[in-house]
Amino acid sequence: MPVPDTAFRHHPALRTLIRDPEQSFFRDLDLAELDQRMIDRGVPMPWRRPDEERETLRRDFLAGHAGPVWVFAYGSLMWDPAILFDEVRHARVLGFSRAMCLVDRRGARGSAEAPGLMAGLAEGGTCDGLVFRIPEKRVDHETEQLWRREMIAHAYYTAFAEAVTPQGPVRALCFVADPEAEMIDVELSHAQQVEYIATGEGFLGTSYEYLENTLAHFDAMQVEDPALRSLLHDVQRRRGAA
């Protein structure tokens, strides 16, 4: 089932900015291959949740839910959702804000020696992004894809939050940074954030590329984040001074 053109009826320009889910690296993610990559990089095992635990979390969270599911995207899910959807809208979620708080020491965009840093959704504030609507008949399969990607390790918890859209409010699924998780550090100083992003590198690329790419997509999608823009400027100065 390809994404229908009608999914972009509210924002036609997004049609060329969002990757075809069926072409995404994250679609049908091969966890055995990821395990081998982690072993090759010397990451202690087990590095991720057991499949059964992840599936239990998903089923428990969605228990009793009926109808379609809206998913809030604040980072790479915006341009690479890897799920099949039938509607996308610009949205502002209430109660959570974007933060550079996901510390990567496991090889994706950082290492134990030079940690990387990526975005998470932290408690408090508001956050601009996109919401994707999964039709009811696809909810089970597409949320399995989402949990395999977002809940692979202990970094996030799931919550429903109100998302304000130009077409009206929706109740959206959010993957929220868990402040109790080892990979999450919401207390990082600005200087630490700059250092991690300037030097972190792994098999998915550098943390600098991640931030630069994030803001490039924000520009194309008309999403504003002045704090992230200022952070990129400071990272570029740090890299230029190295």
Image: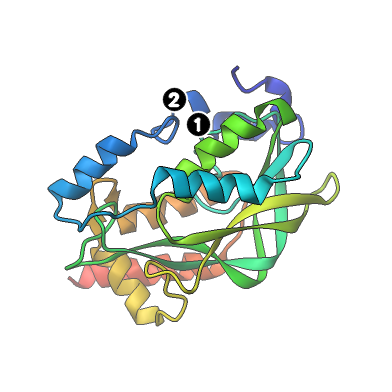
Q: Nearer the viewer, residue 46 or 6?
A: 46
Give the crowd class for mark 2: few <14, some 14-19, many >=20 residues within 10 Å: few
As drawn, the label of residue 19 is: 1
Q: Nearer the viewer, residue 63 or 17?
A: 63
Question: Which residue extends farthest top?
Answer: 1
> Residue 118: x, y in percent?
40, 60
Q: Name which residue lies at 58% across and 46% down.
A: 58
Q: Nearer the viewer, residue 166 or 124?
A: 124
Give the crowd class for mark 1: few <14, some 14-19, many >=20 residues within 10 Å: some
In the image, residue 186 above or below residue 58: below
Please name the amino acid that badge 2 sits on.
Gln
Task: Tell me the residue that label 2 is attached to.
Answer: 23
> Residue 45: x, y in percent?
23, 55
Residue 81 visible in the current orientation: no
In the image, residue 105 above or below residue 149: below
Question: Which residue extends farthest right?
Answer: 168
Q: Name which residue lies at 27% across and 54% down.
A: 46
Identify the secondary structure beneath mark 1: loop
Q: Name which residue lies at 71% across and 50% down.
A: 172
> Residue 6: x, y in percent?
73, 23
Q: Is residue 74 left or right of residue 198?
A: right
| Residue depth check, mark 1 versus mark 2: number of the one nearer the observer | 2
Q: Nearer the viewer, residue 58 or 121?
A: 58
Quadrant, the C terminus: bottom left
Distance from Cα at disc 1 to Cα at disc 2: 7 Å
Please name the amino acid that badge 1 sits on.
Arg
Residue 187 visible in the current orientation: yes
Task: Tell me whether the residue at label 1 lies in contact with that at label 2, contact meaning CB atoms closer than 8 angstroms.
Answer: yes
